Image (cartoon, rainbow, N blue to C red):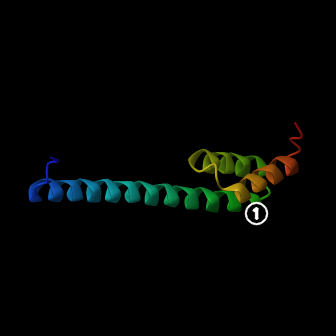
Amino acid sequence: MPRVPTCKSVVFSIMALLIFLSTSSAAQSRQADAVQSLYQKAREAESRKNYQEATGYYEQILKLDPTLHTLRANLGLMRYLNEEYD
C-alpha cells in the first residue's frame, strides 16, 4: 500500500519549491537588468558611431541570452558598419 505523505512533508515540499522559484526569478531579474544595461550602452555607442564598442556590448548580451534574435541582427549590422565582412 502506498505511503500517504504527512502534513510536514507536504509543507516542506511546498517551501522548497517556493524557495527554488524565488531564487530562480531573482536570477532572471538580475539577468534582465544586465541585458537592459548592456543594451543601453550598445545604443549609446551606436549613437557615437562607435560600432566596435557596440559590437562588444551586443556580444555580451547574446552570451547572456542567445534567444534575442533581433539583437543578433543588430550585431550583424554593427559588424557591417565596422566593415567586418568575414
Residue 4 point in image, percent of width and height: 14, 53
- Looking at the rendered structure, the kind of residue marked 1 is Ser
Q: Categorize mark 1 by other alpha carbons within 10 Å: few (<14), some (14-19), many (20+).
A: few
Is residue 48 toward the left or the right of residue 17 in the image? right
Residue 19 point in image, percent of width and height: 27, 56
Residue 61 point in image, percent of width and height: 62, 51
Q: Residue at x 60, y 44 (%)?
A: 63
Seen from the viewer's position, the closer of residues 79 and 68 is: 68
Is residue 42 toward the left or the right of residue 7 in the image? right
Q: Residue furthest top?
A: 86
Q: Residue at x 17, y 57 (%)?
A: 10
Q: Residue at x 89, y 40 (%)?
A: 85
Above or below: residue 39 compared with residue 76: below
Residue at the spot of label 1:
47
Seen from the viewer's position, the closer of residues 83 and 13 is: 13
Residue 46 at least partly seen: yes
Query: Number of numbered discs present?
Result: 1
Seen from the viewer's position, the closer of residues 43 and 29 is: 29
Is residue 63 toward the left or the right of residue 46 in the image? left
Residue 50 at least partly seen: no
Q: Quadrant of residue 15?
A: bottom left
Q: Quadrant of residue 39?
A: bottom right
Q: Residue at x 50, y 60 (%)?
A: 33
Task: Give SS at disc 1.
Answer: helix
Residue 86 point in image, percent of width and height: 87, 36
